[in-house]
Amino acid sequence: MVQHIPVLLHQTLEGLAIKPDGRYWDGTFGGGGHSGEILARLEAAGHLTATDRDAVAEERAKQYADDSRFTFQRGTILEMTEQLDGPWDGFLWDLGTSMMQLKDPERGFSFKEDGPLDMRMDRRHPTTAADLVNEMREEDLADLIYKYGEDRLSRRIAWQIVQARRHERIETTLALAECCRRAYPKKHHRIDPATRTFQALRIAVNEELDQVSEPLPKAVAKLAVGGRAAIISFHSLEDRIVKHCFRELAANGPYRIHTKKPLVADEQEARENPASRSAKLRVLERMPDGWSAKKGGRK
């Protein structure tokens, strides 16, 4: 079993300011690292609901099946925001791809090992990355890679993909990665040329940005007074959504932002857990009705 190391664990627990008898929601259970630490801080009256769209995460959650303080439900953040009742004393969303997904070649998330070009976090979803790569128009594919991967060579990459698929359907991660590498000049690159294209396809396949922008205001509205939202993002597109949403909520309602700048991994964590290097944590707190950041907290 792949070892799961939760990112920004200390900062997240501190940001949530967990109450022993509180009600919490971990919207991205993953390997269960954050959930386990939340449970360790809850007394008998407290409760944690964990959710995830991935069947592997559902299996991992069975380790807590006998704990009366714990409930697991399978589904996306968007689905669970609609279904779960508040008020919550806090919720956590870790928006990154888990090591369980990245290290399993059969999931198709990694360009370092060969595997089927899948990338679905929920395999009940019909569309795979291979479907997009082989069926999208060249112009649309280039736009997708630029929009979600922010790759300036998106048009070259899309052209290489289209040339390759004319000979045979692109079905594997290494076949796609090779297309990306051929699009780049032959020189040393800071990151693998396939990195941004794989990110873009993963975001598109799993509708990741919609899983943040649409449910976040609704989830925050279900916080109890004093309740906190802790969101960990791993790329600028998601972090931008969280930042702007928090700012708008704080400007127009009883909410206080606890992270003027996002919290990031310290040197030790970044060294011991490379996955944490791009992680950013933002925290928002629900204040009493009538509280206003513009008035320094006065009603």
Image: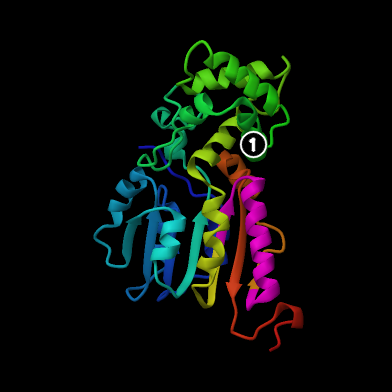
Circle 1: element type: helix
Pointer 1: what residue?
Answer: 149
Counting the numbered discs, the total is 1
Q: Which residues are magenta?
A: 230-255
Indicate the position of residue 126 as horizontal and vertical percent values: 39, 38
Q: Is residue 221 visible?
A: yes
In the displayed structure image, the side of residue 59 where residue 174 appears, left or right: right
Give the dominant element type of the magenta stretch: helix, strand or loop. helix
Work out which quarter of the rendered image holds the N terminus and state it. Answer: top left
Residue under the point 26% across and 57% down: 65
Q: Is residue 250 magenta?
A: yes
Residue depicted at 63% across the width and 78% down the height: 254
Query: Does 66 appear above or below 287?
Result: above
- Observer-nearest residue: 200 or 100? 200
**Which image quadrant for residue 288?**
bottom right
Q: Is residue 14 visible?
A: no
Q: Of all residues shown, which one is farthest toward the bottom?
A: 299
